[in-house]
Image: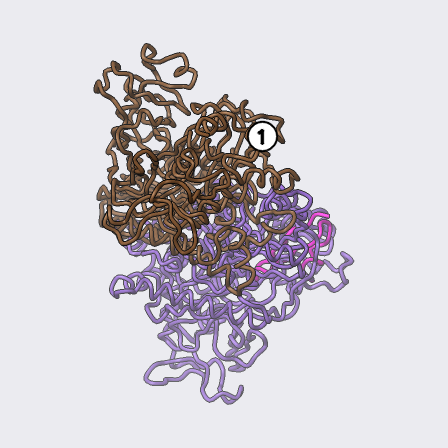
Chain colours: A brown, B purple
């Protein structure tokens, strides 16, 4: 029985299921909640999903509109998995509150089907080694190699047994009657046994790591089942050395041992997350047998201790774009020292492996539709194109949408307000927090909502200034700075109120303008208009959703029909998971990194002007945002 | 201009010369003294050498007899190098006293021709990397890879740049204007840059290591020129844990951490030699960029810290026969931590990489002539065959011929008596010492000579007992043990006399009998007789020569015409050098290890009987030694 991997967007959950199972089954196994009132009978038509990548059979056509079909929609209960799939779950098909990726409530599935289609970065293979015989005189290791060749010969161009495994082999093999488990890593197509253990049916774990400038996110995955277990996010310890990649580079140059220090800080951050995840599951570091890391180009350099100085000097060339598969010990990760560590390949100095991974996970390079992919992080990266061509660029957005530089801003983790809406009639703010917890702050998607809501209601003007004449006790001045109170502390049992002030609003406006100007410049340089873009996919760690209408209203995204805009979540970590679980994904990333043509925004004269014009809500030039102008005019 | 490597036997010196140069030129460059009275005019006919392997042009036929031609002899001054060669210098062509391999007097040649025909285990490649301005879309490492592909693309199936080199690249490249030197290792056909340095025209060094049970020999080689620089020999620190491989295995089993301790001891021994050689040349450990190690199967296991216990248990299977190319750091050698460490592949539990290396260096597997190859070490290994088939076996000879277990016995190093002859008429012992130094003891070849001489003159009887009635003041009893004085201490300014006693003689007889019985059993099992063997090549660290007549007289070698017997020196270390310098040799060894069929002496019932019969000089059964019987009868 063959099996396939199914990845669900926006949250990147992966699961392996047997061929022929429905997407709904896969979603249930992956812990993804899809609305399905009829219980999977194909009757209610609520479980619509978009097949971004891969082949299915059956669609449930009678419940789908022409428009649905044009978008690649299928009914999750009717479509059967016949291929490795990337499936997007639209907001309207998500059931109830979604947990964010950091939440541990999505337990691992246990589809134990034999993997036939994918070669994970590392896996545990059970070996029934032939016992030693005098004739023909084969050494222990030759019999292991033979056994591996039989089991997985076609998977690898060659096999070798590493020194540590060699050292374990003779005693362990005899003690265990030659029933062993080999830890086999995929080192660029070559298989290496980097560990040998007694055959106890142990589970194997891997980590998918999104090495962000501001935040590091680590997912713990059970490799055999492709099952998501847990996630952990942490502020990158490097943040104390500067907010963005440029200031980090400067820091390495201005401090002796600065490079080593930043390397050690990002490693420590990752290791803290890995340690927390491992401890939570009661597993030891050596049970984590693979790591797939994605990061922007500077983070990739810093993680490996490679000097990134040239990235900010003419002609802005990185030291490395693609790195051979390394080992846990080399990279200083607290996992099995011999475990393969894959790093997603970078495109250029400012378009890194996180983008390559994201583009792969979002299926941009496979789609016939002209797609604009925007990954909002501390750097905002954009990719435009389709299966025939791809172009990419990067702009320095700053970490405002990750919650940094905004008082009460926070990363999208438990307690973050991810949806916000203000009703002036009742003077109430409605909000939803991640994990339905007591509000602790406000994350990216909440900030987008809040800005949009305050703009729409006239609490702030188009320059982002708070209207102190607005009739609401939420509008006030604190420490001589105007602010708007989102949550009264006394209502939720906290000492202070959660508010949004003008300084934070200005940071958000600068961030959104940098991204918008980048997209505009990129499109313009290609002779394209925003209206010609068939899909806009927004990735990033905003939370579990991003409201498209709000994003357009504040001028973060171009003014296109809202159904063209989709939030696809943290595609970087989703790509890292794919790389962890399948060689196709790893090869796919290498190919994508080669295919993407880099476009340098900073050398285009118009970019700065566009950025300055964008420092308004939604924009200085309202002709670019006709639907918003209409809405705001209605209010006026 | 293409160039070739020439290896000279018996001492294993290597040199690289341009195509078309004479073998005599090559010998001079390698520091090998060949007799040549006419100065290379082809007139004196004294520089006869045997081309064991490879193709030459011109032979000097008019100075060669039919017999010479049949043996593959050529005149060194007339034959030009057209191929990688192995050349044997017969004793009669050696000029004056030979230095032994440990002697540093053979300075390195400096034939700086570009190497076209061989891919050393590691080498330094000068890179002129295109500066980043020219190709801004490429990272530093991509431009390095491109540059390597151009220079050596055909040499390797793929190239990668290791982490340490990646870390050095960006700063070093810019500081040095992209003129760098890459340390490129051959890891089983894949090229890896394991170091990057500024382009200073530095030399690159490698070590060839013979990891013997009793003695470790290390040669320091300059890689670019294939030039021999120096050698160092040291008693293996493991000797304190037992004399032979079996007692070493037992030691690892009977002591907690015994395996780690033996591993560390052999590493320490190698490192002491490497350190001495490096210090002598004023080079740092990181300048040694490759190591080729050959050792018997147990030594190979112990060096790598792999448990060898199964070797002495039914069915006598080693853990490893062939090991992937490792790194200096993995193996704990005091060389560049990323440097490739090649280990010659083993055939079976008792026929190791030293034999594979030796068979390669001696050209046994390429020859049409039926050859018996005997490597005398603490274990005596034998290979019989030709280019069509090869069979091998091993017997436990003990270290007597390495000087161990014989009072005044010593390893073949400076001050060892390597030729000995006793004249009863004058009661004088004539001898030659290595390095023409004051005698310190007696090495293998001297012991063979001494036994033969004492037997021939009647000082000892056929059981090895000293005839106390023999009329010589050299025959005496000391500490209740009969002995024969070889050197009077007062004559050479030492406090004690150098003598050979009955205990030592008994050990030598046991050793020679083990070897002879092994050869006899091997031949018999193949239905062959000694008289059918066309060549007997004797390898080992006896000294710089071994007298064939003496060896037959004492029954160490079968009674065949003496011109069939050749002493080929330490072929193990010669093979290690070849592996260090050329991929052909490394691949050749892998092939040899597969080709050689292992023959287990211990399971043949007749072996023990043959061994016991051999505990006489030359043998209990004189019919096996007709020429010796004749000589001894003449005396009687």
Could you say which is closer to the camera, residue B529 or residue B400? B400
Q: Secondary structure beneath disc 1? A: helix
Q: Position of residue B186 (x, y in %)?
A: 54, 49
Q: Quadrant of the N terminus of chain A?
A: top left
Residue A224 appears in the picture as rendered:
no
Q: Position of residue A586 (x, y in %)?
A: 45, 36
User: Which residues make up the magenta segment?
Assistant: B1-28
Could you say which is closer to the camera, residue A395 or residue B306? A395
Q: Is residue A150 left or right of residue A301?
A: left
Q: Is residue A303 left or right of residue B117?
A: left
Say which residue appears at 66% left-offset and 40% top-offset: A605
Q: Where B286 falls versus A571 (above or below)?
A: below
Query: What residue is disc 1 on?
Result: A523
Residue B7 falls within the magenta-colored stretch = yes
* Quadrant of the image occupied by residue B433: bottom right
Residue B500 appears in the picture as rendered:
yes
Labels in figure, total: 1
Q: Position of residue A295 (x, y in %)?
A: 46, 45
Q: Where A164 falls versus A429 (above or below)?
A: below
């Amino acid at each position: 029985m063959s099996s396939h991997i199914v990845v669900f967007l926006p949250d990147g959950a992966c699961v392996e299921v047997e061929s022929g199972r429905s997407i709904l089954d896969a979603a249930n196994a992956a812990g993804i909640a899809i609305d399905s009132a009829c219980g999977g009978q194909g009757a209610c038509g609520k479980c619509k999903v978009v097949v971004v990548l891969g082949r299915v059979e059956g669609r449930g056509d009678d419940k789908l509109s022409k428009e649905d079909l044009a978008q690649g929609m299928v009914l999750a209960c009717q479509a059967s998995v016949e291929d490795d799939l990337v499936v997007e779950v639209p907001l309207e098909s998500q059931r109830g509150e979604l947990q964010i990726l950091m939440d541990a409530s999505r337990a691992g599935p246990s589809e134990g089907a034999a993997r036939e289609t994918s070669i994970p970065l590392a896996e545990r293979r059970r070996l029934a080694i032939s016992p030693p015989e005098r004739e023909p005189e084969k050494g222990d290791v030759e019999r292991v190699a033979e056994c591996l060749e039989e089991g997985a010969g076609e998977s690898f161009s060659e096999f070798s047994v590493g020194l540590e495994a060699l050292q374990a082999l003779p005693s362990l093999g005899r003690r265990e009657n030659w029933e062993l488990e080999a830890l086999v890593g995929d080192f660029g197509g070559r298989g290496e046994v980097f560990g040998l253990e007694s055959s106890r049916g142990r589970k194997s774990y891997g980590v998918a790591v999104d090495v962000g400038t501001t935040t590091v996110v680590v997912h713990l995955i059970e490799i055999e089942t492709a099952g998501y277990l847990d996630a952990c996010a942490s502020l990158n310890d490097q943040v104390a050395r500067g907010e963005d990649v440029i200031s980090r580079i400067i820091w390495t140059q201005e401090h002796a041992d600065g490079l080593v220090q930043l390397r050690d800080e990002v490693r420590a951050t990752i290791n803290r997350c890995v340690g927390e995840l491992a401890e939570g599951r009661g597993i030891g570091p050596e049970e984590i047998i693979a790591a797939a890391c994605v990061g922007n180009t500077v983070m990739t350099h810093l993680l490996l201790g490679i000097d990134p100085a040239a990235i900010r000097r003419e002609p802005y060339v990185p030291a490395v774009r693609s790195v051979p598969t390394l080992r846990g010990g080399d990279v200083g990760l607290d996992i099995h020292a011999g475990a393969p560590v894959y790093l997603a390949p970078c495109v250029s100095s400012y378009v890194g492996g996180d983008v390559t991974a994201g583009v792969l996970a979002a299926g941009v390079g496979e789609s016939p539709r002209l797609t604009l992919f925007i990954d909002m992080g501390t750097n905002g990266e954009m990719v435009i194109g389709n299966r025939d061509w791809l172009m990419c660029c990067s702009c320095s957005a700053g970490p405002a949408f990750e919650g940094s530089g905004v008082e009460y801003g926070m990363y999208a983790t438990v307690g973050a307000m991810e949806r916000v809406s203000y009703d002036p009639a009742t003077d109430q703010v409605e909000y939803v927090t991640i994990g339905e917890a007591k509000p602790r702050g406000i994350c990216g998607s909440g900030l987008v909502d809040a800005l949009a809501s305050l703009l729409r209601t006239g609490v702030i003007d188009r320059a982002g200034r708070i209207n102190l004449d607005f009739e609401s006790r939420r509008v006030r001045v604190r420490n001589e700075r105007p602010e708007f109170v989102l949550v009264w502390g006394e209502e939720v049992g906290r000492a202070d109120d959660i508010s949004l002030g003008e300084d934070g609003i200005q940071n958000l406006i600068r961030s959104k303008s940098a991204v918008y100007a980048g997209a505009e410049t990129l499109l313009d340089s290609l002779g394209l208009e925003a209206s010609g873009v068939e899909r806009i996919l927004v990735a990033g760690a905003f939370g579990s959703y991003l409201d498209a209408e709000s994003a357009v209203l504040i001028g973060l995204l171009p003014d296109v029909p809202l159904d063209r805009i989709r939030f696809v979540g943290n595609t970087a970590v989703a790509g890292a998971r794919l790389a962890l679980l399948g060689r196709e994904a790893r090869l796919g990333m290498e190919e994508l990194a080669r295919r993407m043509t880099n476009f340098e925004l900073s050398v285009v004269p118009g970019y700065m002007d566009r950025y300055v014009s964008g420092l308004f809500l939604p924009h200085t030039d309202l002709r670019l945002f006709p639907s918003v102008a209409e809405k705001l005019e209605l209010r006026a």
